[in-house]
Image (cartoon, helix red, strand yellow):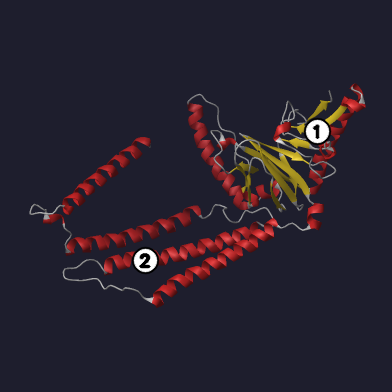
Amino acid sequence: MTTLLVFIVVVLLAIAVWQLTKIFDLTQIGANVNDTQVANDNDNKVNGYLMFAFLIFIYITTIWCVLYYGHFPLLSDSASEHGPLVDNLMIISLVLIFFVQTITQALLHYFAFKYRGKQGQKALYYADNNKLEVIWSSIPAVVLAGLILYGLYAWNNIMFVEKEQEQDAIVIELYAQQFKWEARYSGPDNVLGKANVRYIEGVNNLGVDLADPNAQDDFTASELHIPKGKRIIFRMRSQDVLHSAYMPHFRAQMNCVPGMVTQFSFTPTMTTAEMRERPAMIEKVANINAIRAQKSQKLIAKGEAALEPYTFDYLLLCNKICGASHYNMQMKVVVDTPEDYKKWLADKQTIVSAYAASKASEEPKENVVPAAVDTTKTTNTEAVVAVVTKK
């Protein structure tokens, strides 16, 4: 494939050089100009028909892409309350773009043929036409203004969180660093403890302020669990470079900027299990596994391990090119039923309490300050509590 691409590039470069030499020849003034390189009526006619052929090629390619790729779930798999609003805005934009592109391309190629160069024909020149100027300026302005206003309406509905909703929401911090994510839960008090990169030391890799009482019940997780039907408020930080927290199925994206805290919130509407049972997702997973099975046969023939079957999971991705391992910066997101989420949360809080109690029995109480809890290490519960002892 690489060899073919290199060959195509070399051919195109050769054609470009050839055309440049012809242009240079035409620019020379004198008796030695080669008049055979000047386009005549037949050349213009041929180029006009070629423009029509290219127009047909564009439309055939567009129709083929819609028929071939249109069955994939692209704008019908949102799993958040604001998802349909974002999808509607996207669909409206795509329809408008498709409509304008179809008309403008047809007119462009038609005029290129109709008004092709002919012997003795002169172009009609308009110095200005106020009526045309108003028409082709006002129509795009009105359409774009409508899109912008709808976009602002959608953005305000997504970003504005009422006080009642905020009080009842779950607060989770998404901490970005090259090249992984960590989620810090606010614990029973639903208030995240203060944090700063200057506090990063040893096991306190999130820079949590250990003197802040609100940080005492915080815990971290390598797998992001959120409940269906509950508003989640994400507070986002970055340790090193600019990242972007992107959760495509929830139509959520927000930059993670070093030195500041950004925020995004949404309400999940579909559990992981429910999304896996959707017909479109079942078909998509089957197609992916069919491709992986073919690749596995080639790997096995080489004596290598086969690919594991693909199972759908929501993902938290980084949507900024943040370094060499950017492609691998992702975290699994699990949307539980409210009952399953409470059970998962209770298990984590039990571990926090048990570990803190064991540490408290080993050291004098006044010398022990529990730090943010890291629930990413152990096998059964994936939880380890980090405790920092005062000096």
Frontmost of labels 1 and 2 is: 1
The image shows residue 58 at horizontal and vertical percentages of: 38, 58
Give the residue type at disc 2.
Answer: Ala
160 left or right, relative to 130: right
116 left or right, relative to 317: left
The residue shown at (90%, 22%) is 363
Name the one closer to the observer, 372 or 60.
372
* Disc 2 element: helix
Q: Quadrant of residue 43?
A: bottom left
Give the residue type at disc 1.
Answer: Leu
Q: Is residue 55 above or below residue 18?
A: below
The image shows residue 148 at horizontal and vertical percentages of: 57, 63
The image shows residue 1 at horizontal and vertical percentages of: 38, 37
The image shows residue 348 at horizontal and vertical percentages of: 81, 36
Q: Quadrant of residue 183?
A: top right
The residue shown at (19%, 49%) is 24
Give the residue at mark 2.
106
The residue shown at (68%, 60%) is 157
Q: Residue furthest bottom?
A: 131
Give the residue at mark 1.
210
Specify few, some or many for label 2: CA neighbours under 10 Å numbering under 14, 14-19, or 20 or more. some
Q: Is residue 220 above or below residue 81?
A: above
Q: Which mark is residue 234?
A: none
Name the one closer to the observer, 209 or 317.
209
Name the one closer to the observer, 224 or 195.
195
Q: Please tell me which of labels 1 and 2 falls first in the chain.
A: 2
> Could one spot residue 125 in this view of the protein?
yes
Q: Quadrant of the C terminus?
A: top right
The answer for how far apart the CA atoms under marks 1 and 2 are is: 66 Å
The residue shown at (53%, 33%) is 324
